[in-house]
Image (cartoon, grey):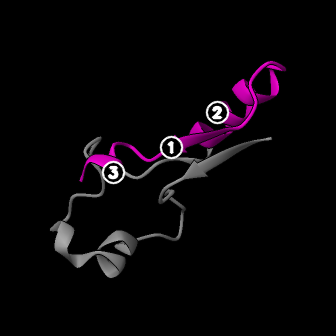
């Protein structure tokens, strides 16, 4: 079993979602400087699907938020 664990993703309807949840970030969404996008999560899922040997992993997609 492999999991993907995305952080906040940019949606067409999002304006200041991250600031609503974490106003202490002062406009910084992630060290990468932006919210993730759905196609980036899809790329990670395709990578997992293409690797039968990978098991027991959680793929973190957070733009560096683990370091904030």
Of 35 and 5, nearer the camera is: 5
Q: Residue furthest front?
A: 56
- Which residue bears the numbered disc 3? 65
Residue 45 — which label?
Answer: none
Quarter of the image for the N terminus: give it.
top right
Q: Residue at x 29, y 75 (%)?
A: 22
Specify whether residue 47 is painted magenta: yes
Marked residue nearer the N-terminal end (2 or 1) = 2
Specify whether residue 43 is painted magenta: yes
- Which residue bears the numbered disc 2? 44
Q: Residue furthest bottom?
A: 20
Q: Measured along the vertical axis of the image, is residue 4 above or below residue 21?
A: above
Q: CA distance from mark 1 to mark 3?
A: 9 Å
- Element type at mark 3: helix
Q: Position of residue 8 (x, y in %)?
A: 47, 60
- Element type at mark 1: strand
- Neighbour tally class for label 2: few under 14, some 14-19, many 20 plus, Cα within 10 Å: some
Q: Residue at x 21, y 58 (%)?
A: 28
Residue 61 — which label?
Answer: 1
The stretch of residues the image draws in magenta is 39-68
- Neighbour tally class for label 1: few under 14, some 14-19, many 20 plus, Cα within 10 Å: some
Quarter assignment of residue 27: bottom left
Q: Residue at x 24, y 54 (%)?
A: 68
Q: CA distance from mark 2 to mark 1?
A: 8 Å
């Amino acid at each position: 079993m492999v999991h993907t664990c995305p952080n906040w993703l940019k949606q067409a309807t999002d304006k200041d979602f991250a600031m609503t949840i974490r106003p202490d970030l002062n406009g910084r969404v992630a060290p990468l400087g932006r919210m993730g996008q759905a196609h980036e999560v899809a790329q990670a899922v395709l990578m997992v699907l293409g690797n039968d040997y990978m098991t027991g992993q959680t793929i973190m997609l957070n733009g560096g938020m683990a370091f904030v």
